[in-house]
Amino acid sequence: MITGQLRSKIDKLWEEFWTGGVTNPLTVIEQISFLMFARLLDMRESTEEKKWSRKNPGKPFPGVYFPRNKQHLRWSHLKQEADAEKVLKIVRDEVFPHFRVMGEPTALAADKDVSRKALASGSLNSNSPRSVSEEPTVPTNTFNQYMKDATLMINKPSLLMSAINMIEALPLTQGDTKGDLYEYLLSKLTTAGINGQFRTPRHIIDVMVDLVLAGNEDEALTWTVGDPACGTGGFLVQFMEALREHFTSEDGVHVDDETGGKTHTGDLIEPSQWKHIKSEMFHGFDFDVTMLRIAAMNMMLHEIDTPDINYQDTLSTNFTDRKETRRWAADAFDLILANPPFKGSLDEEDVHKTLTGKVKTKKTELLFIVLMLRMLKLGGRCAVIVPDGVTFGSSNAHKELRKMLIEENQLEAIIKLPSGVFKPYAGVSTAILLFTKGGQTDNVFFFDVQADGKTLDDKRDKIGADDDWQDLDVLRKAWPKWNGGKGKKHFKDRTANAFFVPKSAIEENAFDLSINRYKEIVHEEETYDSPKVILGRLKKLEAEIATDLEDLEAMLG
C-alpha cells in the first residue's frame, strides 16, 4: 500500500525530471528504473559481501557484481560524492557501460582476482554470476540482457544528484512497498504507444487473474505463464502477487502499524515452488525496447529475480525460427494473460504462415488470438482483452476466428467492459475473452460490466470505497457459481448482468458473440393520461392565467 507521503515523494521526483528537461513519461520511468536498478544492485552486492565476510573472515571481498576495481561504481559510493559533475561523469561514462557488459566473461576477466583458468573451466561463465561463497540470487546475465542498451538521458548534474537523493529515500527494501511504488510510477503513463499498446488498469488485471485462478490455485503453482505482448509486465507481476496472497497463512500476513497496509509473505509456498515461480514460471515478449526494460525492472521490484523478458515480435516468423524463442512459440504455456495491441504497423510478409493460414487477415487483434492458441498447451487457458469488434465483426476473418473458438476449443466466457475503461489512453470498447485450447464449447458465460468502480471519463477517479469495484465484484462472486457450466440454474435470466448462451443459439446467430445479441432489455411501459384528461388540465391552467391577469389589471387601476 503506497502512502500519501510516499506518493508525494514520487510526484516530487517526477516533477524534478520534468523541470530538468526530461519530459517524455516513458523516458522518465526508464531513467528512474535505471537508478533504482543501480541501488538494488548495490544492495545485492552488500548481501554478497556479508556472506563472504562470514565464511572468509579477514579476507578481502573480491566483488560479485562489481569487481574490486569497479567498487567505486556502487550506489553507496556515488551517493556520498559531493561533486555533482563528477557523479554525472562516473554514471554516464562508467556505470552505464558497466551495466552493458555485466555477465560477460571478458568483463569478469578484467578483474585480476578472477583466473582465466576458472573461466575456461566453466566454473565461472556468462550464465551465472561470479561465485564467492554461494551463488547470488540473480544471475548477472539477467541484468546484462536488459541493460545492454541503457543510456543516461540526464544531462544536468543537479538533476542527477536530486534523483539519487530522492531514490535513496524510497523504501526499496520492502518487497510489497517497492512493487506498489513502481505501480504508481507506471500509472503516470497516459498515452497509447504508436503500435496501439497502452497500460492495462490494475483492477482489470486483478479480475482477469482471479477468473483464471478460481479453483485452480494448487495446480497453478506449477504452471508456465506467458504474455506475448507484455508491455510493462503487469499481468505477470499480478499473477505472482495473487499466488503469494492465496498461499499466505494468517501468521504470514504482516500489517504496517502506520498505514494498515498488508504484506502477504507466501509462507505456505515451498522453497522448490518459489524457485519455479521466481525463475521459471514467467515469460514475456515485446518489441518495444523501452517497455522491455520497464517490464524487467517491474518484475525484479516484485521479487521475480530472473525475469525472462524477450525482445520479440511474436507475430513474426522468427519467433518460431529463432532457437532462443522457438520453444515458446507453440504448445508451451499453461496460461496466457494478455492485452495485445489493437492497431499499429504490421509487416504482412513477416507474419508466420501458421497464423494467416488459420485466419487470413491483417488485423493484429485476430492474429494474436490465433497466436495464443498456438502458444498454449492442449488444455491451457487464456484470458485476453480484445476490441469489442472481435465479438461481432462481419468479415470472413472475424467469423472464422469465432467459429474456431467455438468448434475447435472451449470458449468459456465473454466479459464486456465499458468503453471508458482505457481512458485517457483510448475510448475503445473492449471485452475479455476466456478460453481453453482444445475441448468443446457447450455453453458460453456472458457478463456485462457497466460500472468498474471508477468514473468513465478521462480522469478515471475512484467511485466510493477503495475496495468497492461495483460490477467487477459481482463478476467475482458470479464466476464460482457458474463453475464451468455446472451452475447454469443461476444464470438463465438474460435480463441480468450475468447469463449463459448455449452453443446452438450462437451457431444460429452466425457465431456472433456480441452480448447485445443475446441480452434481453426490459423496457418499462410508459402510461399516459387520456386526451380528455390532458385537455381538462389545459383548460384549468388557462382559467388560472385569466384570473391572474384580471387581478393584475385591477391592481393597475
Image (cartoon, helix red, strand yellow):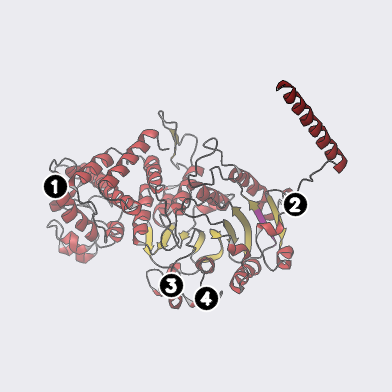
Mark 1 and mark 3: span between their CA atoms? 45 Å
Segment colored magenta: 442-446
Mark 4 and mark 1: span between their CA atoms? 55 Å
In the rendered image, residue 452, in percent from the top left (x then y), is placed at 56, 45
Instruction: Check disc 4 and report its element: helix, strand or loop.
Output: helix
Mark 1 and mark 2: span between their CA atoms? 70 Å
In the rendered image, residue 306, in percent from the top left (x then y), is placed at 35, 55
Q: Which residue is mark 3?
A: 316
Q: Quadrant of the C terminus?
A: top right
Mark 4 and mark 3: span between their CA atoms? 11 Å
Instruction: Check disc 3 and report its element: helix, strand or loop.
Output: loop
Q: Residue at x 31, y 43 (%)?
A: 15
Q: Which residue is mark 4?
A: 356
Disc 4 + disc 3, Cβ < 8 Å: no
Type of amino acid under label 4: Thr
N-terminal of the pair, mark 4 or mark 3, is 3
Type of amino acid under label 2: Lys
Q: Badge 1 local density, few (<14 within 10 Å), some, or many (20+)?
A: some
Q: Which residue is mark 1?
A: 85
The answer to which of 152 and 129 lies nearer the viewer is: 152
